[in-house]
Amino acid sequence: MPWPRWRYVLPLRLRSVFRRGTVEDEMDEELRFHLECKVEEGLARGLDAREARYRALRAIGGLQQRKEEIRDMRQVRWFSDFAADLQYAARAIGHSKLFSILVVLTLGLGIGANSAIFSLADALLLRPLPVYRPSEIVTVSSFTPNSFAETTGPLSYRDYVDYRDKSKSFDGLAAFTDVTGFGFASRPGQPAKLKGGILVSGNLFRVMGVRPELGRDFNSEEDRIPGRDAVVVLGNDFWQSQFGGDRSVIGRHILLDGIEFSIIGVAPKTFTGLDQYVRPDVFVPIMMWPRLIADPKRNPLENRGDHELMVKGRLKPGVSIGQARAELGVIAKNLQRAYPKTNRNREIAVRTEFAMRLQSDPTDAALIGMLLALAGAVLLISCANVAGLLLGRARTRSREIAVRLAIGAGRFRLVRLLLTESFLIALMGGAVGIALGYGGIAFFSRLNVPTDLPIRLSVQLDRRVFLFSLAISLLSAVLCGLAPALQTTRTNLVTALKTADVEIPGKRRLWGRNALVICQIAASLALLTAALQMVRDFQQKWRGGPGFRTDHLLTMAFDPQLVRYSEAQTQRFYEDLIRRVRALPGVTSAALTGALPMGTGGDGLSVIPEGYQMPAGKESISVDMDVAGDHFFSTFGVQMVRGRGFRETDTATSSKVAVVNEQFAKHYWPNSDALGKRFRSDSPSGPLVEIVGITKTAKYEWMGEPPTEFVYLPFAQHPRSGMTLLVQTEGPSAALIEPVRELVRNIDAGQPTFDVRTIEEYYQKRVVSAPVMITQTVSAMGLVGLILAMAGLYGLMTFTASRRTREIGIRIAVGADAGTVLRMVLRQAVILVAIGIGIGLFLALAAEKGLNAVFATSGIDFAAFLMILPAILGVTLLAAFIPARKASRIEPARALRYE
Amino acid sequence: MSKPQDLVQGTLDLLLLKILTLEPLHGWAISIRLRQVSGDVLQVTEGSLYPALHKLEQEGWIKAEWKQTENNRRAKFYSLTAPGRKQLEAESANWVRLSSAISRVIRLKEA
């Protein structure tokens, strides 16, 4: 088979680029050979040597032109030109170091802000699942019009099996549980540690296209018989941390919740889990579920009403998400008919991963959108500045460029040269930006929930962030380089060559610069008001405090189910624990709670308040709730407004009671006292619960939340395995960590304790740090924006004033006084500032709308505007005043001799 | 690039490819061969020969090799490549079509 054409062409191109000298020499030699032959021929025809040589050269027709033509034939012109441009650009940048540093730093600020924000957005929202072809994966969730968890609505195992077996749209549907705490011990007799894993359907690894790094994944046998196959696949991080990456772990046994599991595989490093946060330590077949649940009454594998599974599937090639939705919709209808008891009104949703993430946490999504917009604004400002600076410098080069144009350089060629320069600058800015962004990423990675479970927000500087920064750099090169390059090369040759610095102040040449000034003022105004408003908003929200004790409190979490306690054993354990802790010296009081506010363990409850008219189509209302033991309210510092907290007399057999907050009471009994009123819980036929106490409305999810309805139920009437112990202490609470641990060991040496923290630490890490970081981020961006805008404005004002040096000189020479000149120069600035502020106000009001949506506030924060407006006005006018005053003091003789 | 004015565009490429079908030749030999075969009808400036040769080389239709001439001097010899042979066939066919069409048109005028 003959060589294809490219086999001849490619080596030639490479040679033209990399062996340029050799190629040139060969060309010279070839032409010389031709000339020599020609001369010899002439000599043979009897010409004298000079004449022969002359004729030979004539015949060639201009040796240098021919060489150029030949060089053109090599088709690598663009490349060698680029290399030359790059050299030239590097020289130009090195030539004016201070200018370059200024430009690179300005760009770096803009790019760095974007890298950092992007890495956050990537971690929270954008990064695709770490599986094979993640775009084919969709999320299936089930919901009823009633259920509050519509977005992540889990499926029951039985429903999942029906969807899996009856649908044809998928190359497999896989199911898995939310992160589940396991009591892990590497061998019997060792105290159990809390680890987090997920239960998965046997096909999960195959559907996700994830091949184990070591060993194998689950086979179909292990997905068949409940409770038989105790096998486990380890998460890669877990394997590294617990087994030091030992490759001989396959076949070994570990204990999970006291059951011996055999290790069959290790997940690859790339597979971090099935959502953005949870990095499972272990993967356990779902068939082991009944054995892991100590409660014999619960059987999630059989009970169609037990909705706990997340389901993801891979669409078959050519099947659209709409087709899958339609198919599953039909199955859902059939299930509604077949199982009216559990599946009445139960519908199915099929969503892409991205849509699911957006809908499951709209607040986060809105916040990210806002931060991205802010980062974009900062980038625009810095690009505008750099463009202004480049424009200013391009002007000093207008003569050089005019000369180049005059001797025949094409305009496109010159634009390319100038763009190469801005590309180089942008790449340097990108490097600075990535360094700054790295700092920002380190800052954001502190944004983690304090928990012992493997839940982590991985904000990282990875390839995606790097590529994003690179793209942003290139974009900014075009943004800030194109306008100056185009404008500079649009020089009027004659005037530019005649006098170096006179420009005709035509309208056309000025619009770009004016627009830049206006944009900067507008953007920084919008940014700063947004930042200030956020700060003020947070301050205001903070003033009331969180509504619970934030000092002298120790928290410690338990889950006796992890060591296979029965319900009765658990109950006894907690009774024992609370009694003994209260007797400890240094303890003021102690209580149990289901979850700490603003933590990960929040719960929901469906309620039907008596006498309340339900909105159409709704059977119940879902509210946030917590399970609390006796003395909880006094221990945790939740203020009782009326009625009582839970007491020892509220037992499983006494009448059902609840404590609600003021917001809840006010909402459902607006005109009467809620105390003594009742609501049904769970469903319209559920038990009646009497309200025995009303607390002040506290903060439950985060400090910025609007007043939220909340219900507390007594632990005695709603027993559960996972509880958190609260210990109020007389002295520093950290001093009691060991005594309490010792006490737990005395009750049961194998009982795992986790999330052991002082409330100060918890409050700082969980409650204070995130919002403070957000405010700091926005303020920092606003400040960066302001600094950039100030620098840009000053630069542009200096520039516009200096453009008119000659004109001003003439005016002064013919009798204008300094005041007149000052006013003349300032007039332009005032007009620009006015327009900029006008647009900025408009933007700020739009931003305010967005902020109101995020922070659930309303109205316009006029005070923020009142603080920012004069500041912007002052800064801009000062920036204009300095160059204007300088201009008004020009010595006419010098100005006219300017060139 | 200056083109020989009396040659239809692309014809020089065709001629060069054709000349190189017989044997590998260096530039000087090619220019002599051009003169010989076409007589004085086709005047090719010697200068435009080399850009044309380099273009054909860069297109991958001919390849170059440094070899000794019969009187022992180093020269760059060009020879046809397989893709070049195909290109020649295509261009020859094209040329035949074009010239026959033109001659038909001319005869039509005379009739």
Image (cartoon, coloured by chain):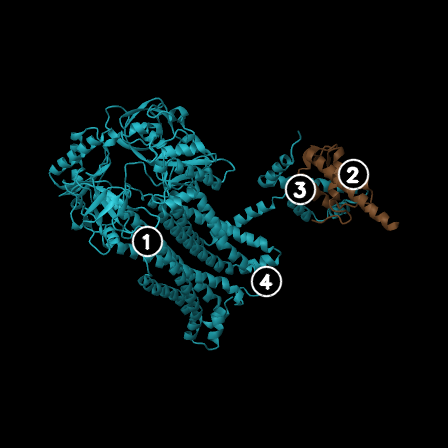
- Relative height, residue A588 to residue A193 (above, below): below
Which residue is identified by label 3? A28
How far apart are the alpha carbons under marks 2 and 3?
A: 22 Å
Q: Amino acid at mark 1?
A: Phe
Pick the residue in front: B101 or A472.
Answer: B101
Which quadrant of the structure image shows residue A889?
bottom left
Q: Which residue is mark 2?
A: B33
Q: Is residue A450 above or below residue A421?
A: above
Which hue is chain B drawn in?
brown
Q: Which mark is residue A855?
A: 1
Residue at 49% across / 73% down in the picture?
A: A810
Tell me whether the residue at label 2 lies in contact with that at label 3, contact meaning CB atoms closer than 8 angstroms.
no
Mark 3 residue crowding within 10 angstroms, few (<14) / some (14–19) / many (20+): some
Tell if the residue under mark 2 belongs to the same chain as the one under mark 1.
no
Nearer to us: label 2 or label 1? 1
- Does A808 sit left or right of A12 as displayed? left
**What is the spatial separation of the Cα atoms under label 1 and label 4, in whole angstroms?**
57 Å
Compared across the picture, whether A287 is left or right of A167 comes to left
Q: Mark 1, residues whose alpha carbon is within 10 Å: few (<14), some, or many (≥20)?
A: some
**Same-chain status of marks 3 and 1:** yes
Q: Which residue is mark 4?
A: A493
Q: What percent of the width, then of the height, locates residue A524?
A: 39, 59
